[in-house]
């Protein structure tokens, strides 16, 4: 059976169907992509039943030191100085102002921080193995499936 499946995956028709499927998908962050993701979540719910846990995770980008580090991670050797633990109030306010500016100028840094937090939550807390697409023992027991929904800002 495995040899037949491997042969089917490598066949010309299989490659053609994958190419057509890839070129016919909706663009990310569009209304159509959101509808497709919603359909997938409904299909999971139909297969596994109603969810037994709903979790929301929110990251405060302004308080995250890592958001400040991401734009400077190109290896230019300058590094980013760590704020002192005994900083004055003026230095703390200046650091907060810098983090606000970095967050506005590099929105991808906030996205990377969120993706990292979600990966940590899924793998370490909930016990989901993304490589095998199977659950292992996490803080709530063994996961059978999950559906992730990320809120998007500014989609019209």
Image (tube, rainbow, N blue to C red):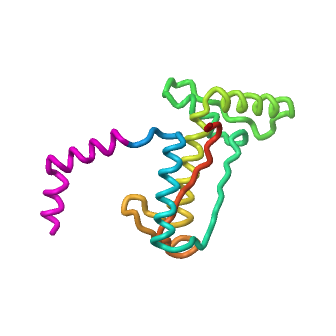
Residue in the picture at 16% in, 58% down: 6
On the rendered structure, is 7 left or right of 152? left
As drawn, 43 above or below 100: below
Q: Where is residue 141 shown, x and y percent of the image?
A: 54, 76
Tell how many labels: 0
Q: Quadrant of residue 52?
A: bottom right
Q: Where is residue 93 shown, x and y percent of the image?
A: 82, 32
Q: Where is residue 80 shown, x and y percent of the image?
A: 62, 30
The answer to whether residue 34 is magenta is no
Q: Quadrant of the C terminus?
A: top right
Residue in the picture at 71% in, 45% down: 60
Residue in the picture at 48% in, 40% down: 28
Q: Read off the magenta span.
A: 1-24
Q: Which residue occupies the foreground of this view, 145 or 115?
A: 145
As drawn, 7 above or below 100: below
As drawn, 136 above or below 108: below
The answer to whether residue 3 is magenta is yes
Q: Main secondary structure of the magenta part?
A: helix
View extreme (right): residue: 89
On the rendered structure, is 43 left or right of 10? right
Q: Quadrant of the N terminus?
A: bottom left
On the rendered structure, is 118 left or right of 62? left
């Amino acid at each position: 059976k495995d040899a037949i499946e491997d042969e089917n995956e490598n066949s010309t028709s299989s490659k053609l169907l994958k190419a057509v499927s890839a070129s016919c998908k909706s663009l990310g962050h569009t209304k159509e992509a959101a509808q497709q993701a919603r359909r997938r979540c409904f299909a999971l719910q139909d297969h596994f039943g109603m969810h037994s846990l709903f979790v929301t995770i929110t990251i405060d980008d302004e308080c995250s030191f890592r958001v400040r580090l991401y734009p400077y991670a190109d290896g230019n050797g300058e590094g980013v100085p760590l704020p002192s633990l005994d900083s004055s109030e003026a230095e703390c306010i200046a650091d907060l102002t810098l983090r606000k500016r970095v967050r506005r100028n590099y929105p991808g840094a906030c996205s990377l921080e969120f993706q990292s937090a979600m990966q940590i939550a899924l793998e370490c807390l909930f016990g989901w193995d993304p490589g095998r697409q199977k659950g292992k023992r996490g803080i709530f027991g063994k996961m059978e499936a999950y559906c992730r929904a990320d809120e998007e800002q500014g989609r019209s």
